[in-house]
Image (spheres, grey):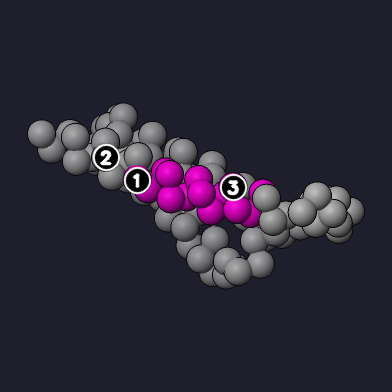
Amino acid sequence: MIEYFGITATILFCIATGVQACKSMYDGHSKGISHGLIWMVLIGFFLMTIYVIDKVGYDLILLSSYGVQGFLWAIIAKYKYFERDDIWIEIKSKKK
């Protein structure tokens, strides 16, 4: 039963992060996300992955959660530091 809690939490966390990553990709930027949040989350996922491997072992639920969210946060960070060119924003706005 407790495994289902972990799986459900992982799915919810990944979907929530995925929605933000999709918004950043769609908008072409992550202007509303602070630098501190991005770096604390990315470093936290990295350190927590090392901790889980060392203390818990290769727990698939935890490691997949940290791996997927770390990847999605890297996408968010990419759009924070490397915004898409304005030409794409202009094309998107003309479609509306």
Q: Residue at x 51, y 66 (%)?
A: 37
Magenta stretch holds residue 79:
no
**Quadrant in which the C terminus appears:** bottom right
Graded by Cα atoms within 10 Å as few (under 14), some (14 to 19) or many (20 or more), the crowding at tag 2 reads few
Stretch of the chain drawn in magenta: 12-25
The residue lying toward the viewer, choosing from 46 and 8, is 8
Task: Residue under label 1, please give it.
Answer: 12
Give the spatial CA distance, label 3 vs label 2. 21 Å
- CB contact under 8 Å: marks 3 and 2: no
Q: Position of residue 18 (x, y in %)?
A: 50, 45
Q: Position of residue 21 (x, y in %)?
A: 57, 49
Tag on residue 88? none
Q: Residue at x 17, y 34 (%)?
A: 3
Task: Residue under label 2, please give it.
Answer: 8
Give the spatial CA distance, label 2 vs label 1. 6 Å
- CB contact under 8 Å: marks 2 and 1: yes
For this orientation, the residue located farthest to the left is 1
Tag on residue 22? 3
Looking at the rendered structure, the kind of residue marked 2 is Thr
The residue lying toward the viewer, choosing from 96 and 81, is 96
The residue lying toward the viewer, choosing from 33 and 43, is 33
Q: Position of residue 28 (x, y in %)?
A: 72, 54
Q: Callout 1: helix, strand or loop?
A: helix
Looking at the rendered structure, the kind of residue marked 1 is Leu
Q: Residue at x 10, y 34 (%)?
A: 1
